[in-house]
Image: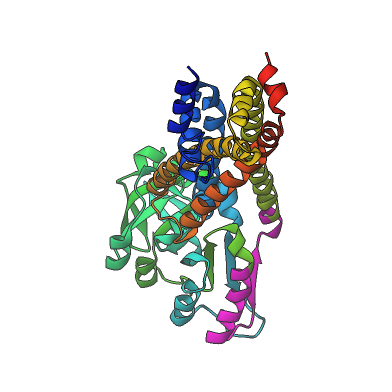
Amino acid sequence: MANKTLQSLRAEGFLPKDRGTRLLRFSDLLRISFREVVRKRRRYIGVMAAIALGTAGLITIVTMGRDLKANLNNDLDLLGGATIIAAHFDLQMGDRQEWFRTGTIDAIEKIPGVKEVTKSRFRSAATTTFQEKVYGFNLLGVDTNYWSLFSFTPRYGRLFNDADISEGRKVCVLGQDLAKMIFGSPEGAVGQMLNLDNNLYTVVGIIGGVRAADKTLMAFLPITTAQARVPNISELSSLYVRCNTWDDVAPVAAALEKTITTYQPSKGLRIQVGWEPLKQVQRVFWWVSLFIYASIGATLVLGGFGIWNIMMAAVTARTREIGLKKAMGAEDSDILWQFLFEALCVTFSSALLGVALGMVGVQYMCRSLGTQPPEGLFAICLLAGLIFAAVLGVGSGLYPSIRASRMQVVDAMRYE
């Protein structure tokens, strides 16, 4: 019986084949640790799931953080409005009215952090006649960037597109209240003809969206059409710039004034930034980010405590096994490394599962947002996840391993 026990211990790597070799080889440690984890997988499944989900969440949030900010800017009106910078020229008494040159606008579009620039031409007190009634309203000639920059959507019909701009088509978009006032109902206005300065324009849509509230009594024409057909329309004395994220607002605002001054006279230039709404948005996002990262950190820490608790229970349950191995010649370091490698095996298996889930999460976010993760950042996050797994494994398994290695042979053998 004793011979069989010795043979089995030698076969499993617990006893050396001769007295000149170390009791446990590195390959034996890995094999035995992995086998113990597989055997007790039901005990480890909870903490492994916690660590895997925490790792996956951390990889996804860190990798896609900037794109998530950009998506929030696009979808949420409050955040999107905080990233809009207005630039315009005030008419100085006795001076000629300045307006933005084409070269200036092209340079502004190339400023790092600028997502889009919209141009507009304004005419106040425009009039139209419908069924022998005269209606007055303000008129804007805009480009297609105007819709996305202010998060406008078509409530009815459609908004004019690049083809309408390039071909100078005689189409228009109306605010909801203006359409109701002239045609009786916003929905019924689509397809109607609007007479403006002896030119007939087809109403193709009614604007909607959260920010459309202050534009309900305005009419919109393609900027090329307005420039060619509407008399007394203003020059390009104002434009709006939208930044990629709120982090870009301050540097873009600083670069905007410098760029305009470089390319043309800037007398009467005014740059308007909603600093207070921007601070509020940043404050809210900071607290949200803190909550997310704290939740991920708590999940990982709880996973570490779970491993520590399970390893302590394993040491207690295998006390007689530890005593038997020491009686057969195992050194303290052999016992320490065995339990430590078992903890590392749990954390690394969890981290690898978390990396796989993180890759799926990143790909899903990329597909949803229509973007790609920053080059190199995903690989850094993967490496950081594995390093953290090693630290977590050592931190949670070191004390139980030291306790197991310092057991006295006689006390361990007598443990019931």
Q: Position of residue 65 (x, y in %)?
A: 54, 51
Depth check, front residue: 181 or 398: 398
The colour scheme of the drawn protein is: rainbow
Q: Position of residue 208 (x, y in %)?
A: 46, 44
Q: Position of residue 145 (x, y in %)?
A: 43, 61
Vertical order, 401 against 26 (above or below) = above
Residue 99 in view: yes
Magenta segment's dominant SS is: helix
Q: Residue furthest top?
A: 416
Q: Position of residue 83 (x, y in %)?
A: 58, 58
Give the quadrant of residue 82.
bottom right
Taking the spot 44% from the left edge, 42% from the top edge, the residue there is: 361
Taking the spot 53% from the left edge, 48% from the top edge, the residue there is: 386
Query: How many tags in the picture?
Result: 0
Depth check, front residue: 365 or 399: 399
Depth check, front residue: 254 or 401: 401
Q: Is residue 279 magenta?
A: no
Q: Is residue 408 left or right of residue 203?
A: right
Taking the spot 38% from the left edge, 51% from the top edge, the residue there is: 370
Give the quadrant of residue 183.
top left
Which quadrant would the C terminus be assigned to in this image? top right
Residue 34 in view: no
Q: Is residue 255 magenta?
A: yes
Vertical order, 57 against 129 (above or below) = above
- Span shown in magenta: 251-278
Taking the spot 65% from the left edge, 80% from the top edge, the residue there is: 92
Depth check, front residue: 55 or 231: 55
Q: Is residue 260 left or right of residue 190?
A: right
Vertical order, 74 against 294 (above or below) = below
